[in-house]
Amino acid sequence: MQRRRTLHWAAGLTAAAALGSSARAQTPAAPGAATPLPGRAVPGDMAPGKPPVDPKNKLGLEVDFVATPDEIVDAMLELAKVGRKDVVYDLGCGDGRIVIAAARKFGARGVGIDIDPDRIAEATANAKKAGVAKRVRFVQGDLFEADFRDATVVALFLKWNYNRKLRPRLWAQLKPGTPVVSHEHDFGEDWPPSSETIVNGKKIYLYRVPQKSA
Ligand SMILES: C[S@@+](CC[C@H](N)C(=O)[O-])C[C@H]1O[C@@H](n2cnc3c(N)ncnc32)[C@H](O)[C@@H]1O
């Protein structure tokens, strides 16, 4: 249970979101969790300091916006061996930092999907600022209904139960061998990771989509 509580926390103040903003304000941060900043989020991948969060969670999302710190973004993309030929999807893309870093630092193309239109507007603006607007796009939608069949790499920072729900769609849509890299959250016993690493105390898991069973 301890493990689940830790995961729940790290996915974005989800327990607090369920309880409402006053409960969230009184609840201490998990060890190593992103610290809420007052006011608007700082554009990711370009701003030093603590990663931004959405302090309001106005959509009442179970997995709210908490950005992956930039050093973990880089480690995720390196673990997945992202290169110029890749199309990197981030399902639940937040401010777009993973897809933007994939384009800016690794020469890839990318697509970010997020249910929150404010995140999509922010990610689109961040891509322009980073000079990669032609290599990336951001689409508003539900990741559980998304078509990501052209992905050659998928990046995730969601929550343990989201990962488990998403797994059949990943296996159905992605080619065998496609890397799926997840910040913090695993996919459970049914899908063991190919490798994992720890950066600044946070786990990153690398998965490979298995061969389709006959
Ligand atoms: C923890 S944040 C991760 C943001 C970004 N991937 C990163 O690592 O910096 C999770 C994001 O998933 C989005 N989200 C939550 N539920 C979603 C859903 N059903 N479909 C699409 N996006 C969703 C939230 O709006 C939030 O921006």
Image (cartoon, rainbow, N blue to C red):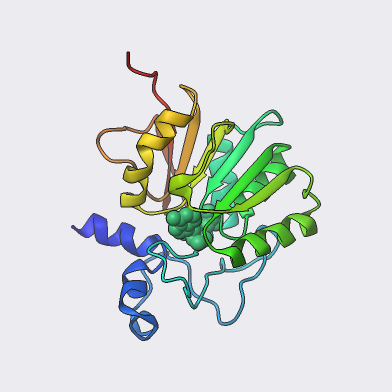
Left or right: residue 96 versus residue 158 is right
Left or right: residue 197 versus residue 128 is left
Image quarter for residue 82?
top right
Q: Residue 124 appears at what percent x and percent y?
A: 71, 58
Quarter of the image with the N terminus in it: bottom left
Image quarter for residue 166?
top left
Query: So how many labels did they put on this image?
Result: 0
Q: Nearer the viewer, residue 189 or 202?
A: 189
Residue at the spot x=38%, y=69% of the render? 13
Residue at the spot x=42%, y=29% of the render? 172
Q: Nearer the viewer, residue 46 or 141?
A: 141
Q: Residue 132 appears at what percent x and percent y?
A: 77, 48
Relative to residue 145, is residue 209 depicted above or below? above
Left or right: residue 118 versus residue 207 is right
Image quarter for residue 80?
top right
Q: Residue 142 appears at what percent x and percent y?
A: 48, 53
Q: Residue furthest top?
A: 214
Relative to residue 149, is residue 161 depicted above or below? below
> Would you say residue 208 is visible in this rendering?
no
Q: Residue 57 appears at what percent x and percent y?
A: 47, 73
Q: Nearer the viewer, residue 194 or 119?
A: 119
Residue at the spot x=56%, y=82% of the render? 38
> Would you say residue 191 is visible in this rendering?
yes
